[in-house]
Amino acid sequence: MLIEKLFLNILIVLAPVLLQSVFGDRWRNDQSPIVMGLLYGTASSLCLLFSYYELDLYWDLRYVPLVISSIYWGPLAGIVNYMMILLMRTYLGGDALIFGYISITLSFIIPFIASFKIKELTGSSRIKVAILVSLSPLLVMLLILLSYVSLYKGFESFDLATIPAMISFGILLVLGTWLSSMLQEIHEERFKMKVQIQKAEKMKTLGELAASIAHEVRNPLTVVQGFLQLMRPNEQGKNQQYLNIAMEELARAESIINDYLNFSKPKLTKLESFSFSDVLNNIIVLLTPMAMKNGVEITVNLEDNIYIFSDRGQLQQALVNVIKNAIEATPAGGEVQVSLKKLVGRAEIKVIDNGKGMTKDQLSRIGNLFYSTKDVGTGLGTAVSIRIIETMNGEMNYESEEGVGTTVTITLPL
């Protein structure tokens, strides 16, 4: 059977993702679209080199790596893969070389288009799209075959045994794509889980350290604050003014200490049901003067009748930090968009700015204590916000592009 004879092709198709699983952690920094295009392009070329000849046709799975590289690694990886297939086809030569070029080019069109449209999909949705896209080369091959037969041989010479062979080949194509996609998803999930575990361990250590320092610092501050309050009634004039400034700075220091304690172990003390849009509207009113001062416009698109059961004060603190950071990152004349919509079983908040954006390195360090993209800042506000959202069983994700801006997506269960 055709499936048995193309078993080597199946192994070649699975080789790139298996190599990623084995060496993925070491290769992670080198996994650029070009490198991955070369890796999957090598697999496509080997499939073409070890194709099987039957019924006057060459059968191989060259298009499975092409689909996977385009879907998972983007258009650049797909183009590199496509060029390598063309080079291998040129090397092999043959009478129908021009039909081979046409077939390869037409088969690449749909994977190339899909590579731009699939960025927001994950998991099973991405696998389904990959399988559907993998069927397009089969249709192209059938079209090219019929064109070749009609031009050079005539339909009377067409072998009907080709039809069941094409069906078997289509099943094999879908199976190869499904296996590759599944392994790719498993590899990505494993890597994400490993990163999350490492980050959680690091945050736990930092949290314990922050809590210990905060407790030690709070005690002498409380003593100083007490003595200043005792001195206050007896002082007048400049001394009274100095005491007031000292008390204000002590209050600010206490607020920072509370943030460190909140980072170490956020507590949801006052649970209640409240309107999500009301909380966001209050925050917008609170931050509008700051936005106007910075020359930034805030646009709002909030769905009503979305209620959540949680700690209102903690949620407001987290959202204030996020929106405030967006305003500070946006230049004068820029815009910050705040949206709220209801999804299945959860609410989604998006905060989008058109500031300078972040590099991949900066993006990977967001949420780390003592790291900030601002000239003056500790990164504490962002770290606290992430911990609060996680305590509420929610998720907070950052997407950013240099020169374009940053999008913060927060999802919370309803």
Image: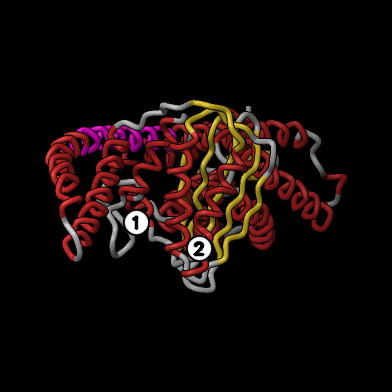
Q: Residue at x 80, y 57 (%)?
A: 152
For disc 1, the marked residue is 362
In the structure shown, which secondary structural element does the residue marked by tag 1 occupy?
Answer: helix
Q: Residue 92: tell me if it is visible.
A: no
Position of 308 relative to 16 (above/below): above
For disc 2, the marked residue is 289
- For the record, the magenta segment spans 188-210
Could you say which quadrant of the image residue 216 lies in?
A: top left
Q: Nearer the viewer, mark 1 or mark 2?
A: 2
Q: Residue 240: tell me if it is visible.
A: yes
Question: Residue 105 location, x and y as percent?
Answer: 65, 59
Is 200 included in the stretch rendered in magenta?
Answer: yes
Question: Residue 199 location, x and y as percent?
Answer: 30, 38
Q: Residue furthest bottom?
A: 333
Report crowding for label 2: few under 14, some 14 to 19, many 20 or more residues within 10 A (C-alpha): few
Q: Nearer the viewer, residue 52 or 203?
A: 203
Q: Residue furthest right?
A: 156
Looking at the rendered structure, the number of numbered marks drawn on it comes to 2
Question: Residue 413 location, x and y as percent?
Answer: 55, 30
